[in-house]
Image: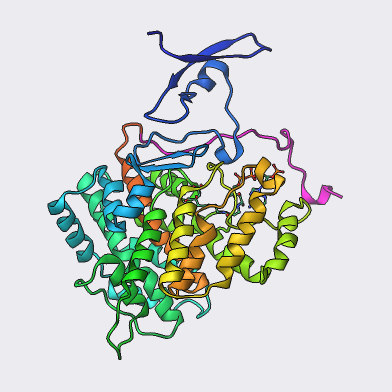
Amino acid sequence: MRKRTVTIIDNQSGKSAEFPVRRGSYGAPVIEIGDLYKELGMFTLDPGYGVTGSCRSAITYLDGEHGVLLHRGYPIEQLAEKSTFLEVAYLLIHGELPNQAEMLTWDHAIKMHGMTHEHLNRFYSGYRYDAHPMSVLTGVVGAVASFYHDEMDIYDPQERLITARRIIGKMPNLVSKIYRYQSGLPFVYPDNSRDYVENFMSMMFSWPTEPFEINPVAVRALDLLLILHADHEQNASTSTVRLAGSAESNPFACVAAGIVTLWGKSHGGANEAVIHMLEEIGVPKNIPAFVERAKDKNDPFRLMGFGHRVYKNYDPRATIIRAACHNLLDEMNLNQPLFEIAMELEQLALEDDYFIERKLYPNVDFYSGLIYQALNIPKQMFTPMFALARSAGWIAQWMEMMGDEDFRIGRPRQLYVGAEKRDYVPLAERG
Ligand code: SDX
């Protein structure tokens, strides 16, 4: 069968060139445009990379039109219901679900990497007590690079796997210490007799004076949130990790770069911004005014937790989180007035032409903060929770990139619209 191509014709020069079209397992086919400059002397321009693919990947597939999310082919709904975050992390990295022996080995390996160098504890006290936790997390994860730099060979697959185990093992420790330090509480060491999420909750909330009781409902809810935030294709923070990694930078430093990108309220910072928005709305009768503000082009206010670059239908994670939020509040017999406001806001927005026309639906961040709040995680810790989960996806994507036969440094081009060439005028002559 004739290979599929597209032809680009320059109607000024009359030159034309054919470019191969590649189809993946699913999703839109792509035009391999790499020879465009050689053939036609042109670059492409796509601000925000709306239709530009940066890589081939086998880790996650999103279908934005139909609200589909697969991790290594497994639907997020099935992983959310039947798996655990640690198992999903294994899946993202290894490409297959582990058997029982592999899971035991993986669990043990992650636990063996749960400690951090004692000197790392000094970094926390260098921050203001009220520093935003994402600024602290950026610093301490970047600092981890200093403990694993000289001897690391990023071209050795086994070393890359050890790095992945270190990141996944240490993130709960690094994140919980932010909360402990800012709360004036002593740091809590990992307890390897506990499972991953239980261990994290113990490091966050246990008291040296009392036995720590684990609430299995809370553990399951948090494990679910970690699963739902683990990876999401080539989002802004993952693309940052890949671009930083393409320069052969230290992978811990690349993850720190991802944390910086995730912090933005257009990205992972939205979960915290949603709660601030719901608290500002306060009561249901104020909802219409906020919806009108979100539609007003003269008002920079946007409905936090709504809209998505890829999903033009429901974010499947939002659907799962809404149901989990409802169940958790019932099971813990919690009255969360913000949940009622969120549901009414969602209902009103989804009936409004502005949101319907622009296919703006709730995304993963719209309800997640309500579950974090029910688990007594403070607002400013919401995005560090997102980073804890997404570090599994970031390091899986970094490993895939480092092992890619097409591996090369990323270097986008541009359309230059600045001043034409001109000569320097000495200061005295500039009037
Ligand atoms: C995450 O990429 C990923 O996969 C990210 C993520 C992941 O798991 O990694 O899913 C996590 O980041 C989710 C998104 C969290 N952010 C928010 O909830 C912040 C609020 N959302 C918006 O800022 C916005 O929707 C974005 C940033 C999410 C998407 O931005 P786009 O794709 O650039 O959207 P756009 O600007 O092209 O919007 C199209 C139209 C515009 O109006 P018009 O110019 O056509 O008239 O929709 C409007 C926008 O103004 N719009 C909104 C809106 N989002 C888009 N209007 C009001 N409120 C909003 N939330």
Residue 250 visible in the displayed image: no
Outermost residue toward the bottom?
A: 209
Relative to 422, does residue 185 appear above or below in the rendering?
A: below
Q: Quadrant of the N terminus?
A: top left
Count all numbered tags in the image, as a single digit. 0
Q: Position of residue 400 (x, y in %)?
A: 32, 41
Kindly identify the residue that appears in the image at 46 percent across and 23 percent down: 32
Relative to 312, does residue 79 appear above or below in the rendering?
A: below
Outermost residue toward the left?
A: 101
Work out whether residue 219 or residue 259 is closer to the camera in this orientation and state it.
219
Relative to 207, does residue 233 appear above or below in the rendering?
A: above
Residue 418 forms part of the magenta stretch: yes
Q: Image check: 112 left or right of 397?
A: left
Work out whether residue 65 or residue 143 is closer to the camera in this orientation and state it.
65
Q: What stretch of residues is rendered in magenta?
A: 407-431
What kind of secondary structure does the magenta stretch mostly adopt?
loop
Kindly identify the residue that appears in the image at 30 percent across and 59 percent down: 168
Residue 121 forms part of the magenta stretch: no
Q: Position of residue 392 (x, y in %)?
A: 34, 54
Q: Position of residue 2 (x, y in %)?
A: 40, 8
Work out whether residue 327 or residue 52 is closer to the camera in this orientation and state it.
327
Q: Position of residue 148 (x, y in %)?
A: 28, 60
**Residue 163 in which image quadrant:** bottom left
Rendering colour mode:
rainbow
Kindly identify the residue that appears in the image at 30 percent across and 65 percent down: 170
Residue 46 visible in the displayed image: yes
